[in-house]
Amino acid sequence: MRLNLFILLLYSIIAYPQSNYPQDYFVNPLEIPTSLSGTFAELRSNHFHSGVDIKTRQRQGFKVLSAASGFVSRIKVSFFGYGKALYITHPNGYTTVYAHLQKFAPEIEAYVKKHQYEKESYEIELFPKADDLKVSQGDVVAFSGNSGGSLAPHLHFEIRDNQERPLNPMLFGLDVKDTTPPFVTALYAYPMDKTSHVNHSNARQKLRLIPLQNGDYSVENIEAFGKIGIGVVTNDRQDYAPNKNGVYNIQTFLNGSQAYELDFRRFSFDETRHINRLIDYEHYKKKKQYIQKLFNDENPLSIIKPSLSDGFLVIKDSADYMYKIKVNDFKNNPTWITMEIKGIKNDSLNPEIQKTTPYFIQAHQATTLKEGRVSVNIFKDSFYDDFYMDFEVHNDTLILHDDTLPVKKSIAISYDISNYKEVDKERLYIANLLGYSKYPVYSASERKGNQLTTRTKNLGTYALAIDTIPPTIRPGNFKDKQWVSNYQYLKIKIDDTPSGISNYRATVNGKWILMEYDYKTKTLTYNFNDGIITDTKNNLKLNVTDNVGNSSTFETLFYRK
């Protein structure tokens, strides 16, 4: 026991050096006061937030500054995700990331557009050499925007180490005023086996929080027995923003001894999806609320610090326990939750009966399920736990359990489409049927002969769907044969249902032109400042293709001096 404790202590000393983050190396990437709409490692759908979201007053176009000297090492432009993103590598080994940009600084913008025109693609990923795009600290490298998956204008800012692991930028001196401790909205208890119970129930129990005048909480006394886990719903709020942000550290204590710790200072991208094991995933899917587990049920996340009990409480009959939770924000504002637990064994308890099906999935083994023309390949370690799966096939509709169970890595769903006409096979795709109305959402489908396959990390209902409707195209800010001499931008609206836009290609007088696509507004935009269009009379031709190959072509004339 003493040896184990020594190893844990040594690990904590090695893993938590407190002074190895330079405090004066990086400057703020914006010239406006810093307030955050999102904090580092905040809980998001299927991932942890890998940086901080800096508010830009609901506007675009603020100057984005290089936080330190270095060179632009990566540039990525995509429809989704980070949108327009810039990566700068610094001599001290760290890389800063600036995302959801409106545009790059002129020299970088010219570099990007040169390669976009060479590859005839708006989406592009570039890795400049160290001498191509050098920058000094404070140089304007871009302008803030709302590109990609951003829901409102802001700057997403990251600092990564030399292993590409994101770290909390506030460790490096990024200062945000925060005098408000975290707040707690719910607390839950989980009996972990058939003999355990909380308040005479074997099911998850919501506990009654009692707010105290000093901002802390107590919990209405509970009676329990056996192996118990606790889950908490908690957020933080900075002084100048109303957003519900993530917390920095959570610790638990049982009878004065530390039982568990979550530390949100760094994680790896290859582990971020394990967030679905950290939270009560079923509750999140049903209620859209994040319950963070304060126990480690075989979760490999590095933010979970080693402990002898893995955070579980083992409550014995006729014993009393004092359980405390400490929630901290980065500014070390603490919120405490105190719970008294009385151990009372209930032998008359009727545990919940586990639902069984003919399909028992063993998490550490590969399994293939097949019925009719549908097969599902479940690869080894696709799930965290063994369970009984619902598997039903009705014509072309597959019921694959439900989406309240997290999937660790992709499974493959395949349909034999040999019974379809050749003309229809090209337009078939596999759809995930979502919501109460079972709305079909395209799941990336690949056809090989008579086999149509999709890979997915979501359980639920799937079906074969067909899309015979080509995309729609209409001019946005101009009309056919219009003079547009005073225009800076040419805008075109494109849309497609049900499978969605796959690609597009635009030319003027036979030359490819760069049109930026914003999927949120369904708009293509051409900037005349590119200087490609020099003729007075111009023939614009646009071809748009959806995900199953339906295409539409739009042609128009416009004039420009």
Image (cartoon, grey):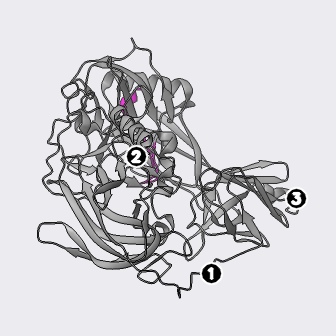
Determine contact: label 1, label 2, CB under 8 Å. Answer: no
Q: Nearer the viewer, residue 2 or 123?
A: 2
- Circle 1: residue type: Ile
Relative horizontal placement of residue 266, taking residue 322 as reference (left or right): right
Q: Tag count in the figure?
A: 3
Q: Nearer the viewer, residue 305 or 117?
A: 305
Q: Nearer the viewer, residue 176 or 436?
A: 176
The numbered dot on residue 262 is none
Which residue, given by chain and number where applicable, does mark 1 sit on?
353
- Circle 3: residue type: Ser
Rendered location of residue 417, percent (x, y): 83, 59
Which residue, given by chain and number where applicable, does mark 2 sit on?
305
Range drawn in magenta? 517-533
Determine crowd level at label 1: few under 14, some 14-19, many 20+ residues with C-alpha closer than 10 A.
few
- Circle 2: residue type: Lys
Q: How far apart are marks 3 and 1 (CA)?
A: 42 Å
Which structural element holds mark 2?
A: loop
Residue 484 seen: no
Rendered location of residue 28, percent (x, y): 20, 33
Residue drawn at x 44%, y 19% is: 128
Which structural element holds mark 1?
A: loop
Residue 6 seen: yes
Q: How far apart are marks 3 and 2 (CA)?
A: 52 Å
Check the image and report above or below for 412 versus 341: above
Which structural element holds mark 3?
A: loop
The earlier-in-sequence mark between 3 and 1 is 1
Q: Distance between the residues labelled 1 and 2?
A: 34 Å
Q: Nearer the viewer, residue 325 or 79?
A: 325
Residue that sits furthest to the bottom in the current view = 348
Which residue, given by chain and number where applicable, does mark 3 sit on?
418
Rendered location of residue 401, percent (x, y): 66, 69
